[in-house]
Image (spheres, helix red, strand yellow):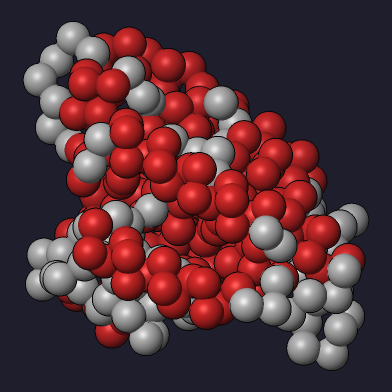
Amino acid sequence: MGKNQAVEKAEYFAESIGRMAYQALLEEIYTVPKPGLVDPYSCGAHTDMDVQTFERSAEALYPWFVRMAYQGYQLTCTPEDLFREIRKTGMLAEEAMYRATGHVNTHKGMIFTLGIFSAAAGRCIQEDGTVTLQSILRMEQKMTARILRAEIEMLGKEPAKSNGEKNLVQYGTTGIRGEALAGYPSVFHIALPVLEDGLLRGMEWNRIKLQILFALMSRVQDSNILSRKNPSVLYQVQMEAMQFLEEGGAYSEDALDKLIRMDADYIKRGISAGGCADLLATSLFLAMLCNKIPNENGAILNLFPVVK
């Protein structure tokens, strides 16, 4: 293969991966109604952002996800060094996000998570010619596990800078670093099985996404709720989400009416499960990436076939 062909191939895969990351961000924001969270019909419990803020942020981040996927495909370094490199890119992406949103933090957690998985996908395709849920999880662990374990140990000994670090000091929760260190169990063991079940049952797409969100809200220690509120409020939200699921969840006939009422309640209480929204977007990205979501014609899109 000539140099130009190799570059074109790398660019094609990187562009495809980056576009899926962008689409996953939009899929999350367009899920409605999401109590306390921003969607096209509500700003939720937020006064500094709306759906347009998230759209601008997603558009600004799109080329950076492409770049991180390209780095994963092209760089010949170790997985750990790849992680170090994309974190530098992630800092540039964060600056682009803040420029696009007027210094509002819309997707900082997503830059971290989708950046890791974009680069991991690029590396998987380079090594195997394809990407699966199993291979991308293995690559994510090779990239991050040792580095993040050391970081978490150090964070408790230094002054907290971010909300996640403050939660670690105050409540002992490890946030998105802990999720990555553990191999994203909330995504692989909660979100993706719910997504697969909804598709097998032929449920409507928006309701599947809502069902995923509430499955996450019922079990995840949402860092955004902890930082904005406290463990007691987090527990209340988990119990409310569990009750919603026990009553049929997003697939019940009156689900949307319940969620609209819940949105009004969460706005009053200032509750926003932003961490769970990020995990929803992550699960949608991985499902698209690994050919788990049918296209509009009902066929599974095989974007990354095994390349011999």
Quarter of the figure with the C terminus: bottom right
Q: In this view, does 82 lie above or below 106?
A: above
Residue 122, x across and y down, in percent: 61, 52
Quarter of the figure with the N terminus: bottom right
Q: Is residue 53 left or right of residue 146?
A: left
The residue nearer to you, when weighing 195 against 80, is 195
**Count of marks overlaid on the render:** 0
Q: In this view, does 199 lie to the left or right of 101?
A: right
Q: Give the residue drawn at x 52%, y 72%.
A: 258
Residue 28, x across and y down, in percent: 49, 69
The residue nearer to you, when weighing 286 against 305, is 286
Q: Give the residue drawn at x 86%, y 57%.
A: 306
The residue nearer to you, when weighing 186 against 253, is 253
Res. 61 in view: no
Res. 249 in view: yes
Q: Give the residue drawn at x 32%, y 80%.
A: 42
Q: Is residue 99 above or below residue 79?
A: below
Q: Give the residue drawn at x 56%, y 26%.
A: 182
Residue 275, x across and y down, in percent: 40, 49
Quadrant location of residue 297?
A: bottom right
Q: In this view, does 132 lie above or below 198?
A: above
The residue nearer to you, when weighing 81 against 24, is 24
Residue 223, x across and y down, in percent: 34, 40
